[in-house]
Every structure is written in C-alpha cells, then in structure tokens.
Image (spheres, rainbow, N blue to C red):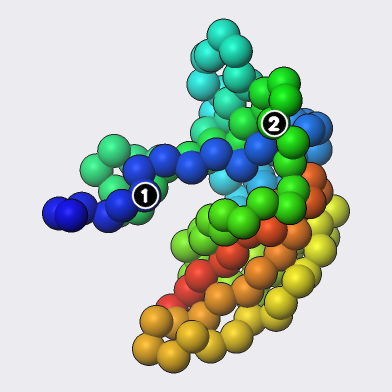
Amino acid sequence: MKSNPVVWFEIYVQDMERAKTFYEGVLQGKLERIPSPDIELWAFPMSEEGYGAAGALAKMEGCPSGGSSTLVYFKCEDCAVEAARAAEHGGRLFKEKMSIGKYGFIALVLDTEGNMIGLHSMQ
C-alpha cells in the first residue's frame, strides 16, 4: 500500500441539524452540503492537497446511528479543548485526554447521535 488506507468516512446520523450543530461547534468549522439523490451528506472542511481523509455526516433511510465498531479520529491542536466543546454542544465525554506515547494524545466523545468519535493531538 503506497498511501494512507482511509480515503473517506461517513458518520451516520438521525437528526442532521442537531449533528451539524454539534460538529460545527466542537470542531469550529462549517460543513458543506454535497448534492446526492439518495443520501443527505454534509462534508467536513477538506482540501484535496491536504493530508488525511475527507468525510461527511450522512443520513440515509435504513442506516442507524450510534453503536458501531468504527472509530473516526479528528485532528486537533489540543484534543482536551475539543473534548470540552463536545459537552457544551450536546455530546458527552467518554474518555478524557490521555497519552498514547510518542503518537500524542487522544480523547473519546459521544456525539448527539450516539456515535463515538476520537480526537487526536500531538500535545
């Protein structure tokens, strides 16, 4: 494999407005609508030249949110800051900022839809 294996992610939600408000508040960025006939998609800010995977919030009939075994990590300057914002925006802190050794720090939060997401920082 010559590149990073993850190229796209989707976080399934039931209440798109509530989920958008949560993620925009925690990550401090605006999501952008991606036109699609069968699925409602709102993309996280992305750059085609940037490092990492792009992704979106997704709402589709028959795809429930919460309780899955896939965990998406968002890059942060200090993951404790975004973790605190999660509670302020209707989510819940699952695991406070903790060291993962030379790879930095992570925190785990639950969004307003019951999905667990990871927050990663090097400090």
Pick the front one: 96 or 69: 69
Quarter-of-image position of residue 79: bottom right
Pick the front one: 65 or 79: 65
User: Residue 101 appears at what percent x and percent y?
Assistant: 44, 90
Residue 89 visible in rendering: no
- Residue 63: numbered disc: 2
Q: Callout 1: few (<14), some (14-19), or many (20+) C-alpha neighbours within 10 Å?
A: few
Residue 12, compared with residue 60, is above or below; it is: below
- Measured in 3D between alpha carbons, the distance from the residue under mark 1 to the one under mark 2, in whole angstroms, is 21 Å
> Which residue is at 39% across, 82% downward?
103
Give the number of callouts.
Answer: 2
* SS under mark 2: loop
Instruction: Report the residue marked by disc 1.
Output: 6
Q: Answer yes or no: do the residues labelled 1 and 2 have beta carbons within 8 Å? A: no
Pick the front one: 66 or 19: 66
> Which residue is at 53% across, 88% downward?
99
> Which residue is at 58% across, 26% downward?
41
User: Residue 58 appears at what percent x and percent y?
Assistant: 62, 31
Residue 92, compared with residue 22, is above or below; it is: below
Residue 97 visible in rendering: yes
Q: Callout 2: few (<14), some (14-19), or many (20+) C-alpha neighbours within 10 Å?
A: few
Amino acid at pointer 2: Cys
User: Residue 77 appears at what percent x and percent y?
Assistant: 49, 70
Amino acid at pointer 1: Val
